[in-house]
Amino acid sequence: MEFSLHHAHPWDVTPKEAMAIQRDLAGHVQQTPLAGPVETIAGIDVSIRGNLAQTAIAVIRLSDLALIDQVIYRAAVPFPYVPGLLSFREMPVILPALEKLTVRPDVLMTDSQGLAHPRRFGLGCHLGVMLDWPTLGVAKSLYVGKHDELGIEKGHRADLIDKGEVVGVALRTRPNVKPVYVSVGHRITLDEAVALALRCAPKYKIPEPTRQAHVLSRYEE
């Protein structure tokens, strides 16, 4: 499955150069409504083991949350761990994995932040802008911003505010369980991102696309 690259740039850069790239590309993020109905969502997760990165992609059919395609791709870790620069560590092993899909997903869901990032350009944004593809980030932990206390009911949400700006939503996907943090990646609205995350989480805290990708990313031959 071929994906066209937009706003290509080098990956072999210093952390300072990487931050400059993020600031430059952040202006290309589009918080716009989805262009059409969503039938498939690809969840993306990367696990790191020593010097090896393993990308897993699980494509879920939205109507019944069935797994309809999956990919595992392994490569050397391309970038050191630097807070805020996860995309430079994971994107070089995500892009080749996407090429191996046989089903073209309507939306990409990353196990990471999108706009809820110090430079408003987390992995969800970076992937979406580079592919010009609808993308959302669903993170398990809070990175930037604060939110009001959530009710214990499933579906309860609170805006995530950073420096006076709404950058995402804290979303309760299971009753009385810690929330996930949903943010726009590219070409989707925050409300649409929240609705998709909630629809994909009928049973577990983590939405099915990234939950199944996470399980797959731990696979060992």
Image: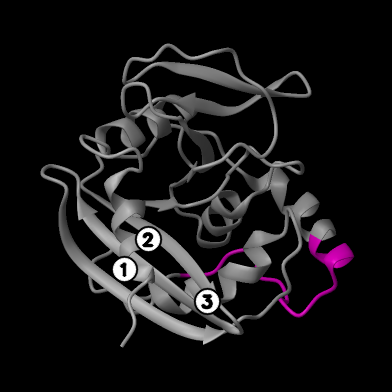
Q: Which mark is residue 216?
A: 1
Image location of residue 121, percent across then percent down: 67, 48
The residue located at (38%, 37%) in the rendering is 34
Report the front residue among 173 and 60.
Answer: 173
In the rendered image, residue 14 lying in the magenta stretch gets the answer yes
Viewer-nearest residue: 172 or 44: 172
Residue 115 horizontal side relative to residue 106, left or right: right
Return the mark for residue 19: none
Find out whether residue 1 is within the magenta segment: no
Query: Hey, what amino acid is under mark 3?
Result: Val
Q: Which mark is residue 214?
A: 2
Q: Which sits in the foreground, 51 or 164?
A: 51
Q: Residues at badges 1 and 3 in contact (C-beta under 8 Å)?
A: no
- Mark 2 belongs to which amino acid? His
Q: Quadrant of the N terminus?
A: bottom left
Kindly indicate whether the residue at mark 2 contacts the one at mark 1 (C-beta within 8 angstroms): yes
Number of residues whose C-alpha sits closer than 10 Å to that of mark 2, classed few (under 14), some (14–19) or many (20 or more): many
* Amino acid residing under circle 1: Leu
Q: Position of residue 47 (x, y in %)?
A: 49, 69
| Residue at 44% from the left image edge and 62% from the top image edge | 45
x, y percent for residue 88: 67, 67
3D distance between C-alphas at marks 1 and 2? 5 Å
Residue 103 vs 135, above or below: the answer is below
Q: For the residue labelled by badge 2, is the local secondary structure a helix, a strand or a loop?
A: helix
Circle 3 is placed at which residue position? Answer: 93
What colour-coding does the image apply?
one colour
SS for tag 1? helix
SS for callout 3: helix
Task: Work out which quarter of the rendered image holds the C terminus and state it.
Answer: bottom left
Give the residues drawn in magenta, as a range: 4-18
Select label 1 or label 3 by which is in front.
1
